[in-house]
Image (spheres, grey):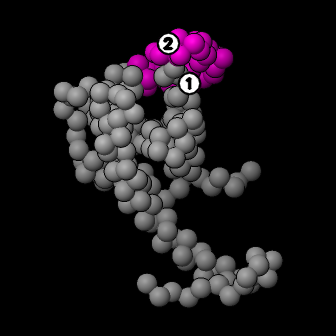
């Protein structure tokens, strides 16, 4: 793909024509996001982190459970991608996933993904010397119960080597649908 490129070497010297060129590149980049996300999900394959299944299988089980439970496409995609940040940010994986999803999903689904790590801690933090009820600092938040439900119904129980999950290809059209265009700009006030 031989496209035109901007001519400036410092943003302060950019012109309207330069930013039009960059905007066109940006559109193409946005349109290929779903493919890059699926490719990144494949990096989770084989990495068990000590669990009974690898991270990809965990994500597939989580999404499959949500889909079989009748959740909408956006929710299922959030379930699929909720741990996509595990390879890049093991200490803040939920933040990575939430940042990727934020422009494309509802406020509620974004909040669930962003906070699922601390809510998931309810099931194991006490084994690490942490407070398993750390999530209670959000007990008055309007999405507290939704996040607790996500972890209870779909996330904490998705480490089963015998569970029959849909494969990654099953979810590709859903990922493409959710990521076809942002619902909101992260730059708006």
Relative to the observer, which residue lies in front, 186 or 43? 43
Q: Is residue 168 above or below residue 123?
A: below
Regarding residue 28, the answer to whether it shows in the image is yes
For the point 22% across and 40% down, the residue is 166
Using the rendered view, name the quadrant where residue 16 is placed.
Answer: bottom right
Mark 2 → mark 1, Cα distance in angstroms:
14 Å
Q: Is residue 132 above or below residue 45?
A: above
Residue pointed to by mark 1: 118
Q: Give the position of the N terminus as an image quadrant.
A: bottom left
Q: Residues within 10 Å of mark 1 (few under 14, many from 20)?
A: many
Residue 12 location, x and y as percent? 81, 77
Residue 142 location, x and y as percent? 60, 23
In the picture, the disc for residue 43 is none
Residue 21 location, x and y as percent? 60, 82
For the point 36% across and 54% down, the residue is 38
Relative to the observer, which residue lies in front, 160 or 49? 49
Mark 2, secondary structure of its residue: helix
For the point 36% across and 56% down, the residue is 39
Relative to the observer, which residue lies in front, 19 or 163? 163
Residue at the limit of the structure toward the right, as seen here: 12
Left or right of residue 106: residue 52: left
Mark 1, secondary structure of its residue: helix
Q: Is-magenta flag for residue 9?
A: no
Residue pointed to by mark 2: 127
Residue 43 location, x and y as percent? 37, 50
Residue at the limit of the structure toward the front, as seen here: 50
For the point 53% across and 11% down, the residue is 126
Stretch in magenta = 123-152
Q: Residues within 10 Å of mark 2 (few under 14, many from 20)?
A: few
Left or right of residue 149: residue 157: left
């Amino acid at each position: 793909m031989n496209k035109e490129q901007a001519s400036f070497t410092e943003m302060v010297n950019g012109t309207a024509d330069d930013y039009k060129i960059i905007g066109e590149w940006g559109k193409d980049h946005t349109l290929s996001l779903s493919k890059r996300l699926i490719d990144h999900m494949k990096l989770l394959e084989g990495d068990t982190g000590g669990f009974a299944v690898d991270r990809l299988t965990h994500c597939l089980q989580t999404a499959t459970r949500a889909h079989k439970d009748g959740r909408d496409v956006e929710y299922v995609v959030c379930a699929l991608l909720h741990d996509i940040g595990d390879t890049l940010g093991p200490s803040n994986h939920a933040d990575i996933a939430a940042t990727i999803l934020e422009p494309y999903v509802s406020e509620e689904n974004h909040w669930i993904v962003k906070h699922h790590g601390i809510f998931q801690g309810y099931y194991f933090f006490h084994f690490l010397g942490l407070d398993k009820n750390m999530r209670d600092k959000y007990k008055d938040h309007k999405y507290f119960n939704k996040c607790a439900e996500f972890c209870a119904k779909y996330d904490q129980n998705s480490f089963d080597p015998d569970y029959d999950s849909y494969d990654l290809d099953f979810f590709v059209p859903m990922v493409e649908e959710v990521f076809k265009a942002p619902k909101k700009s992260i730059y708006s006030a």
